[in-house]
Image (spheres, rainbow, N blue to C red):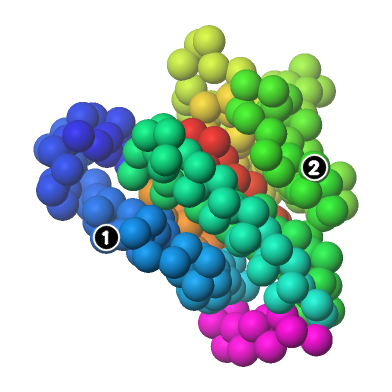
Amino acid sequence: MKKCIRCQMVLSDDARFCSNCGAPQPDWTASQRSTVPSIDLDLEIEPQLSEKFFLALKDRIEREHRPEQYTAYSERMYPSGFRDVIARRFTQAADRLRNQQALGMLETTQLNWFVEDLFEELLDFYIIRYCKDLNEVELPEAILKYQNVPMSEINLFQVVKDFLQFEREPEKIYTDLLQMPIHKLKNASQAFLFPPRDEKILLVADQSLLGNGKEGFAITARGMYWKAPFQKSQIVLFSNLIDLRRKEDWIEINGHFFNAGLTLNVKLLRLLGRLKLWHR
């Protein structure tokens, strides 16, 4: 079963529209097939990891950067020496998987998650450390400190702060609601920000042209709320993140339009990508 991307109504897995609010639903099954790597342990593991890693790199560049850049990113792999790095990591990973298989401790879901986490770690390291000149937006090094850190050990507000670096952004972002003008908070609450009473609000960004708080976005402990000009308000819980991708000058979150400017868009995609794994 899945939940509606807008109202959280429980739906059947094949539902194309929500029976409660009518919102169109992304193809969850197709999305999972395209992003979760599958490894056959009865075959040689290292070549499979190598092949699927380049597919994962292509998917990352197409979703979060620009598709036409893939060749430049992939060709950097050999002269940078990173190809040797991943070869060593894949040998270590293959040994671990074989040992777990021999002990009967490896299920298909665990296998896929292990490979997905491994690729996520390597992609972040490669793109941030080895491809700075290729990145249209500089991704913060602080992202790397969250590799292999379980969700139970993170401070979500610090994670959001490290990923988004909102102190560098021109948008007016409030991290202390006591400092937010009451009329802006009231307008935001009426326009798009309506979490449950016990849901902690981490930040609110005012993106309204008039500075009245009627348009913008907010990140809470459970999800993201926003309203773009001439668009309906949207809610996406971190536990229900499905499809994240960059378009021309905006991004789509579960198929919904979002735009906070180039730098925040790119960094937000990376943040949500990490939260998607933590909440799977």
For the C terminus, which image quadrant?
top left
Pointer 1: what residue?
30
Tag 1, which secondary structure?
A: helix
Instruction: Give the magenta-colored segment's residue range.
Output: 66-79
| 18 on left or right of 149 | left
Residue closer to the observer: 2 or 53: 53
User: Pointer 1 and pointer 2: residues touching (CB < 8 Å)?
Assistant: no
User: Is disc 2 placed on a helix, strand or loop?
Assistant: helix
Asked where in the image residue 119 lies, by quadrant, the reply is: bottom right
User: Which residue type does callout 1 highlight?
Assistant: Ala
**Residue at image coords 78%, 23%:** 176
Asked whether, in this view, residue 114 is left or right of residue 255, the answer is: right
Please report the residue visible at 49 percent of the width from the left and 34 percent of the height from the top: 279
Residue positioned 61% across, 61% down in the render: 90
Is residue 148 shown left or right of residue 187? right
Vertical arrangement, residue 84 with respect to residue 169, above or below? below
